[in-house]
Amino acid sequence: MDPYETTIYHAVLITSLVLGTVIIYFAVSVIRIQRRHFERKRSLLISEIALLESERTRIANDLHDELGPLLSVTRIQISKAADQLATPAYYLEKAEANILTVIERLGGIARNLTPKLLVTKGLEAALQDFIDQYRHISSIRFRLCYEVNQHLSGDQSLLIYRLVQETVHNAVKHSGAHQIQLHLKEYDKQLYISCKDDGNGFASLPASENGMGLTSLHNRAEIAGGHLQCTTAAGSGTEYFFQIPLNI
Amino acid sequence: MRQPLRLVIADDYPLFLEGLHLLLEQQDEVHIVGEAHNGTELLEKVASCKPDVVITDIQMPQMDGVTATRIIRSRFPDTKVIALTMFNEEHLIVDMIEAGAGGYLLKSTSKGELLKAVQSVADGYNYFCNHTSIRLSKLIAQSRSPLLHPSEPLFTEKEIDIIRLICEQHVSKQIADLTSLTHRTVEKYRDRIMNKTGSKNVVGIVIYAIKNGIYRV
């Protein structure tokens, strides 16, 4: 081979090696930065969620421990005042009835703000309670199957509870289903959650509407360190299938 | 007239205790002999005052109402306990019933219902708040309560029909229409059913019926 040609070959080889190394280095850095960025975003989201949940708990406790008893006492005082009058007092009776309604509403709000049962009795009891509440206000048939033996941390239980809550809300609101089956199963350090309904499926919904709900569910799955797979077809129901690593 | 029933009341919110005082003052049937702000204080008061009935909040600092109730019922079996809750917190109520409370009331209860509950529980009956939902009735019926009457007295077919109609939330007048009985006869049946089931209100009948399989939800 011509020495000149050999030099060219060498030059090309060295240049492509250098270029290759640079490109690989660049690609690896981009992936690394992206991964770091994703991790940072996730931990930021997790701490934001923790903050949100602790705020919700604080508000619920305030309603429960301070406003509630204060309203009860006010009710007692009003009924006492009414007793002391010779003639029945229309407006006092009205006020008393209003306070009762406020107390009932307050209870509902406190309950929706934070699932107390999750802390006292764990995820299974809290989910059972959540489903039971639906059973009493909706004609949809619910089935809950819980096959998780591992004890989940408080944070992880809450993430999963909220995720299931939103999935079921979505299904109830949009699917027009008669039956919703919820199945949580633990296998090989992974938690699998399936929520299956016999409703209309996705295609029948306007894209914007199902897009939002679905994105939010994808986000929740991602925050929990897992992912969501959604199988649906018009008229044949929807299945949401989450895979989430346990104890992350 | 019988001696006034001796009460100890417990709640960690002082204003609410004041409210209970206000509600029960000038009532000859009851006399408040002590008050406590947490479970530990409640146990001390029960030991020193030997009350007939304790009315206690469930969530309290130091020792909660559930633990306090369990200890009271085992150490002082003559003292009956009524749980007070702010809202219809079903699982807490069930915990209290399982710990041996004879009944529960919402904090928004009226004077009349409070007195009725105290009397019933002191007489050894259960008393469940008039606001009890079917869902809570079911939870109570399924609970491991030491106090729910387990034996099933014999009911006539007519009585069983009427129990079912009561469970379906029909009032006496509707039941009379549905069974072609007179309103007065239905009322008589109702009284007899309450006696047989040891209930003090409709809720007691519903819980009894669910527990003994007369009514399914």
Image (cartoon, rainbow, N blue to C red):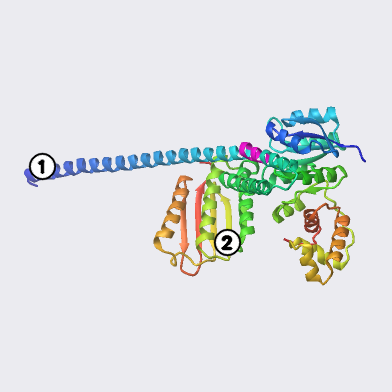
Quadrant in the rendering for residue A183? bottom right
A25 or A206: nearer the eye?
Answer: A206
Query: Is A87 a magenta residue?
Result: no
Label 2 neighbour load within 10 Å: few <14, some 14-19, many 20+: many
* Direction from residue A7 to residue B172 in the image, left or right: right
Front label number (2 vs 1): 2
* Direction from residue A47 to residue A109 in the image, left or right: right
**Chain that bears disc 1:** A
A214 or B209: nearer the eye?
Answer: B209
B131 or A123: nearer the eye?
Answer: B131
- The residues colored magenta run A65-72
In the picture, the quarter occupied by the C terminus of chain B is: bottom right
Which element type, helix, strand or loop, lies under badge 2? strand
Image point 65% across, 49% down: which residue? A94
A4 or B217: nearer the eye?
Answer: B217
Quadrant in the rendering for residue B52? top right
Label 1 neighbour load within 10 Å: few <14, some 14-19, many 20+: few
Image point 80% across, 45% down: which residue? B117
Q: Position of residue B127 (x, y in %)?
A: 80, 48
In the picture, the quarter occupied by the N terminus of chain B is: top right
**Disc number for residue A7:** 1
Q: Is residue B13 visible?
A: no
**Disc number for residue A18:** none
Q: Amino acid at mark 1?
A: Thr
The residue indicated by pointer 2 is: A180
Q: Position of residue A219 (x, y in %)?
A: 44, 49
Instruction: Give the distance between the C-alpha atoms of the residues marked 2 and 1, in whole angstroms.
Output: 72 Å
Image point 78% across, 70% down: which residue? B177
Which element type, helix, strand or loop, lies under badge 1? helix
* Direction from residue B144 to residue A162 in the image, left or right: left
Q: Amino acid at mark 2?
A: Ile
Check if mark 2's residue and mark 1's residue have beta carbons within 8 Å.
no
